[in-house]
Image: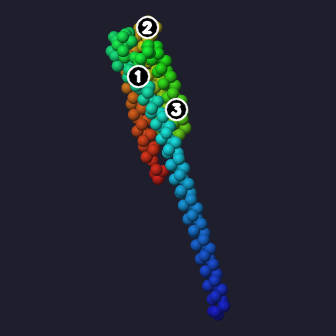
Amino acid sequence: MDAGLAAVLGALAGSVATIGAALATGWSARAQAKMVARAEHLRQRRDARQAVYEEFIAAAEAHSDLAKILLAPTPEDLNDLERLHILPQGMNFFGVIEESKSLHENVAKISTRVQLAGPKEVSAAAFIVDEKSREVRASFGTMHMSADALGGRSLSERWSDGCMRFVRFSGAVSDFTEKARLALDDDGTKN
């Protein structure tokens, strides 16, 4: 092989190696940029989720706190809640029912935002909290009705039903909180 051909082949090999290195560097830079963009997207999404999860939990706890007030007395005391000073200042039983409706509506509104934020497990848990909140609100509505209007169900039976609904509601809020925590801990490396 003569020296000229060796020089041309050496230059060609050098060019191919340089082009290969440039392509590898470009591919690596592109992959790294995608990873950085993905990490930033996940951080922004996690921050937004955390905010809506916190808002949802606060709304559910506000409804839960009202339910605790109403379900604290025994069934015999329900007819005289105002005298027992159990109700919030200046609020009568019907005011509590309206407040429960308002608090549930807030839970339902934020639940929609949580369901959109996802992920699927958290969305499903938010739906259940919304459903149980609606059941608690409905149980308050039946407490002031007469037994005749409710097929003979006594106040004690309705109170007991309200307590059971409250327990399920509280459990659903706890389940949601745990699923939300796990979703926020997910760094996207699983799968």
Q: Is residue 27 visible?
A: yes
Tag 1 secondary structure: helix
Q: Amino acid at mark 3?
A: Ile
Q: Which of the two marks, 2 or 3, is nearer to us in this view?
A: 3
* Residue furthest to the top: 148
- The Cα–Cα distance between marks 2 and 3, rounded to whole angstroms, is 34 Å
Q: Earlier in the sequence, mark 1 or mark 3?
A: 1
In the picture, measured across the screen, residue 152 lies left or right of residue 101, that is left
Q: Circle 3 sits on which residue?
A: 110
Q: Residues within 10 Å of mark 2 (few under 14, many from 20)?
A: few
Q: Amino acid at mark 1?
A: Ala
| Quadrant of the rendering where the N terminus is positioned | bottom right
Tag 2 secondary structure: loop
Q: What is the total number of numbered labels drawn onto the structure image?
A: 3
Q: Which mark is residue 67?
A: 1
Q: Circle 2 sits on which residue?
A: 146
Tag 3 secondary structure: helix
What residue is at 36 percent from the left and 15 percent from the top? 85
Seen in the picture, residue 48 relative to 72 is either above or below; the reply is below
Q: Kindly indicate whether the residue at mark 3 contacts the one at mark 1 (C-beta within 8 angstroms).
A: no
Q: Amino acid at mark 2?
A: Ser
Q: Which of the two marks, 1 or 2, is nearer to us in this view?
A: 1
Seen in the picture, residue 145 relative to 7 is either above or below; the reply is above
Q: Position of residue 168 (x, y in %)?
A: 40, 27
Q: Residues within 10 Å of mark 3 (few under 14, many from 20)?
A: many
What residue is at 48 percent from the left and 50 percent from the top? 188
What residue is at 40 percent from the left and 17 percent from the top? 87
Q: Earlier in the sequence, mark 2 or mark 3?
A: 3
What residue is at 46 percent from the left and 37 percent from the top? 54
